[in-house]
Amino acid sequence: MYQLRKTCQRKRMYQLTSKLSKLSLMLGTSLLTLAAVTNANAEGYPERPIGVMVAYGPGGATDFQARIATLSSALEDKEGKPVSIGQPIYVTNKPGAGGRKGWNWFASKAPKDGYMLAAYNVPHFIAQSIMFDTKYNVDNLEPVGNWGADPAVLIVGKDSEFNTVKDLVDFAKANPGKITVSGAGKFVGHHIAHLQLAKAAGIDIKYVPGKGGVDALKLVKGGQVKAGFNNLSDAARAKGDIKVLAVADNERHTFLPDVPTLKESGFDVDDSSVNFRGLMVPKGTPPEVISYLAKTVPTMFNDKKTQGKMKQTNSPVKTMNRDEVKAMWAARAKSLPVLLNDLKK
Amino acid sequence: MIWFKSKEHIAAIVTVGIALLALVTSFYKTDAEVYLFPRIAAIIITILATVLIVKVIKNTTNIGSNFPKLIKWKTLLPGLAVGAVYLFLLEIVGFYVTSFFAYFSICVIYGRCDMTNRKRGIFKLVVSTIFMIVLFLLFWNLLHVRTPTGWLI
Amino acid sequence: MEFLNYFGNVFTIYHMSLLIGGTLAGLILGALPGLSPTMAVALMIPFTFHMEPAAGLILLGAMYTATVAGGAISAILVNVPGAPANIATALDGHKLANQGRAAEALYYCFTSSFIGGVIGIIVLIFFTPPLAKLALKFGPTELFWIAILGITIIGTIGSKSVIMGLLSGIIGIALSTIGANPMLGEDRFVYTEHLESGIHIVAALIGLFAIPQVLNLIEKSRDAKDAAVHDLGESNVLQAVLFNLTRIKALSIGSIIGVIVGVIPGAGGQIAGLVAYDQAKKLSKDPDKFGHGEPDGVIAAESANNAMVGPSLVPLLTLSIPGSPTAAVLLGGLLIHGLFPGPTLFTDHAEVTWTFINSLLVAQVFMLIIGLFLSRHSGWIIKVPAHFMAATIFILAVFGTYSIQSSYSDVLIMATLGVFMYFGSKLGFSPAPVVLGIILGPIAEDNFLQGKLIGEAGDGVFAYFTSGVLNITMITLVILSIAYSAYSEAKMNKLKQKVLADKERRLKNNNIKGNNKDDDSDNKTQGAI
């Protein structure tokens, strides 16, 4: 800081004695060089830091997982060769309108040169693109890798009268419309799971959207709602205050090995509501950039330190490559409209 | 113009305008369930506007000719123009370059001395440059806020 | 007294330098218009990534307390609150600065921040378990009534006339409904894509306060006579601190309200200062002095702001439910280090947790010392020529607004609101109630709609909103608040009539002579409508 001040002082002395025109010329060139450094054209991608847009606020699960997942992007091996992407990654948050703001910006305005990626949340963004007039959909975005999968779990308060899914469904059958189920918001995985359960069990239960997963969990803990769908990772952490009745996935999860799936409990609910998180680029990005990212991004996710941090923060991981993610997106794009049809009217 | 006797009168008129705007936007061609709260707000605004009008009419006192000039348009307009151009170019040209010019323009236009005073001009240029450097170090380097770069930076 | 065992951890050289650095940086960042505590903490989280858990949390905690207090510096000196929490500080603090008592106001601000802060942390240390239970009891209905309670004080905050204040507040609520409906997700009033995500509270705060200030500055810049530059004012630190300590009433009102508001989960933390200011005004012997440079106003507001910090961590640390927007961001900071809020935090991670809480206590001391020091040396800010000041505030407002959520739309909204507010302020509207409306609107709406859904599934909406001890307490408070407002309004009217009668009598006595003077008194009574 001291040095900087000193140079500034010297600069000022010099500038005061020089002519105005000379000064502005100098200034112009220095600004231009600055611009040139940050705006240089891409050749031999990647040659400068890469951004990741997160459509939610800082501190949320998607945000901090994105930060951990991209932690080792600039890692080099012993010979100084990049292990994965080879450039540092920074995170930019563009929250608003339940993620729509950020993804709209990404699909329409983000640079298509591979220097701006975005984190996706499936099924959330696909469901939104079906229900609303959005600028994004599965066709104008290209996935490059998946780092996590967080299934929705059905939870009730610690003192709840329900101990199994069957208790809850029986009660709902006897008292239609009397069961309230909280979730993180409209059209997120929790909402999808809620719709699937209501359909599979043939019951009338009410969905109460919260302001994010934390708020939805609070409603369950405080007893304001009778049940809730929430993130498996958050529920596993809050084991003391709640009871976890079932997992909305095809298999049991290692975090909660004792909790049965909804299928085991007798309700035909698949993994449509599982919250997949990963990275994508907008369509129109050069194919060589996409293939470079598709190759390096999963390697980055599988880094030892990253995986350790993920484990430490209780974040369920699932690394998938571009082709697997593409198949998963296509499957969701087919199954979700059917589920959401009743809501659309 | 019997109405504009005091700023309370103007305030009342403006309030009526706001109330009308709120009523139209929240009731015309909108869904009752989605617009529940905006509608409640619009109705309360209308009630308050009515009360304000009644109070103003009741308290009409003639301040007469020495009605104060509220806004000095002549001084204000150049500043508003700089602001508007600045905001328009912000994302297109780049945050730091436009901000530098906006800062410098405001300093030059509203400086207390003559605009053609070269010595003061250089001083203002130096201050603007230092301010922008500090801003760049703070936001770009320290806080890692990535502003849109546009054409330049 | 378990926490005493871990005090040693705070006093390592590394942790101390983090504390001092975090406090200094927090005070300066907080003082910049446009950088709120929530943002400062959010921007700092990536830095703590590679630190030890305890070190990272110490840095975040120090930033949190310091930015809350730092926001008062700009509120007092340039009438631009650094965060929603500092609005109440600006109301009387800037008036004090205009009277040439800026240094004094700053000393009050840091002394009461310190006292409030320490009380808040002590509550956090000793009363966490019972308060956590209380926090869970606040469901949608209780929060809805809190928002309504907040609305009842809108009219008396910062404006001369109750009706104009209420009107500004409701306009704020109407503005807050722009964007997606919280329950149905349908867009409202989205005429351009810039309104898609609604109006962010901090963007609105910056626009409503900073832009009118910029325009006022450039308006005055040309007439050299009007541009009276005030000094920081001569004031003895010790004297100011001692005077502050004698204002026990304002301090206790502030601290108690700060603690209560902090514990309540939801966005409530932002209104602690305003509620405390309102109560201090209502309970004061001289309510008329408030708004004209009353030290008690600054003391109550600032002690409440910092008393809120500790208790807002109670629901966060025990239930992972944040008590304020900044605490919500802090949750991310905890999770990154694998510290999961809950009972295990105080058993498995006792060392880190207690070191963090103890460091908050030590941070208060540093905040006081560094804050008082900065106050003494911030006089140059007032002496900056108007044109430099205007340009600096304007550009900082733009950058600050952009960095909230990297949104160009927010910058446009900020500037538009600001220009409207400038014209509005010429007509007698004031920004504080509008901001309060924008804060309270979503709390009222979200919780009403959530409560309605839950009520419909249960015994009916009306019954759900009016049953339970907490709900009834809240409703009683709402009624009391309205009754008090009506009572003081009636008192005002009587006073006004008396003034009018006096005027008539004088008119008869003086005939034409006193015309000009009457106009003056008339203006004042009109202002008090």
Image (cartoon, rainbow, N blue to C red):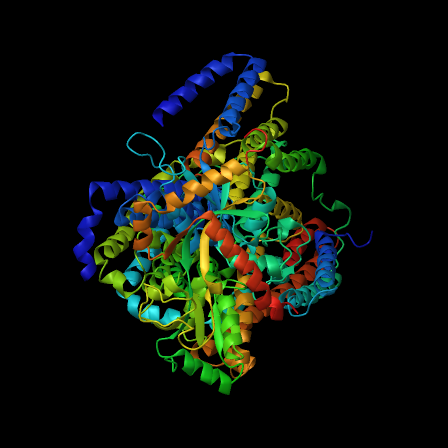
Q: Is residue C396 above or below residue C199?
A: above
Q: How many marks?
A: 0
At a point 41% along the width and 35% down the height, the residue shown is A87
Q: Is residue C303 left or right of residue C486?
A: left
Q: Is residue A95 above or below residue A291?
A: below
**Furthest-bottom residue in view?**
A174
Residue A344 position within the rendered picture, expressed as x and y whole percent measured from the top left: 64, 67
C505 or A228: nearer the viewer:
A228
Q: Is residue C14 left or right of residue B120?
A: left
Q: Is residue A78 above or below residue B16?
A: above
A67 or C147: nearer the viewer:
A67
A203 or C328: nearer the viewer:
A203
At a point 49% along the width and 33% down the height, the residue shown is C383
Q: Is residue C141 visible?
A: no
Q: Is residue C128 left or right of residue C146?
A: left
Which image quarter: residue C460? Answer: bottom right
Residue C85 position within the rendered picture, expressed as x and y whole percent measured from the top left: 46, 54
**Furthest-right residue in view?**
B1
Q: Is residue B80 left or right of residue A71?
A: right
Quadrant where the N terminus of chain C sits is bottom left
Q: Is residue A264 visible?
A: yes
Quadrant where the C terminus of chain C sits is bottom right
B29 or C222: nearer the viewer:
B29
Residue A178 position within the rendered picture, expressed as x and y whole percent measured from the top left: 51, 81
Residue B20 position within the rendered picture, expressed as x and y whole percent measured from the top left: 74, 60
